[in-house]
Image (spheres, grey):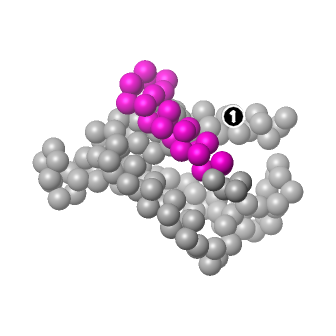
Amino acid sequence: MARLIVSLIAGALFGTGLVVSGMVNPARVLGFLDFAGIGAGTWDPTLAFVLGGALAVSIPGYWLAGRRGAPLLNAESHVPKPGAVDGRLIAGAVLFGLGWGLVGFCPGPALAALGTGQAKAFGFAAVMAAAMWAFGRIARR
């Protein structure tokens, strides 16, 4: 039960950060990815600052987690092992990047954007859920 509560708090904090930083706005993400000025014509560096802030928090967190051995609320750590890159990971990363670049959403901001009522977020979430379902069916074979 404690794990569920901590997960809920962490997810709510993450979603709040996405909303406050404006990352639930696909135009802001696409503006960052348009560093050549082909789309709207102006590069938006906001996402770089959000990513920098995320690194400032996560790097010490990973360092502390590595020193502890096991997390407080789990028997083992689920950090990927070095060298665990395979075809499935590369294919997933390519699909993630294509979706992010075409639509301006990735899963976290899309779910947070559902609370804002954006139609684009509902469409993205529906396609994402269908893709996850299809992957589950294919992976079981």
Main SS, magenta residues: helix
Residue that lies at the very extreme toward the top in this rendered image = 117
Q: Where is residue 102 in the image (x, y as percent from the top left)?
A: 32, 47
Q: Mark 1 points at which residue?
A: 8
Amino acid type, callout 1: Leu
Q: In the image, what residue occupies the spot 83% across and 37% down?
A: 2
| Count of numbered circles on the image | 1
Is residue 120 covered in magenta?
A: yes
Relative to 37, is 13 on the left or the right?
right
Q: Where is residue 135 in the image (x, y as percent from the top left)?
A: 60, 50
Q: In this view, does 109 lie above or below 51?
A: above
Decide if residue 49 is in sight here. Answer: no
Q: In the image, what residue occupies the spot 30% across and 41% down?
A: 28
In the rendered image, which quarter is residue 29 located in?
Answer: top left
Q: In the image, what residue occupies the spot 29% across and 53% down?
A: 33
In the rendered image, which quarter is residue 122 located in?
Answer: top left
Relative to 86, is 105 on the left or the right?
left
Is residue 73 covered in magenta?
A: no
Q: Position of residue 73 (x, y in %)?
A: 82, 49
Decide if residue 25 is in sight here. Answer: yes
Q: Position of residue 64 (x, y in %)?
A: 70, 63
Relative to 18, is 60 on the left or the right?
right
Q: Nearer the viewer, residue 118 or 77?
A: 118
Q: Nearer the viewer, residue 123 or 1?
A: 123
- Callout 1: few (<14), some (14-19), or many (20+) C-alpha neighbours within 10 Å? few
Q: Is mark 1 on a helix, strand or loop?
A: helix
Question: What's the magenta region?
Answer: 114-137
Q: Which of 65 and 78 is in front in this view?
A: 78
Residue that lies at the very extreme toward the bottom in this rendered image = 83
Screen quadrant of the N terminus? top right
Q: Is residue 83 above or below residue 70?
A: below
Screen quadrant of the C terminus? bottom right
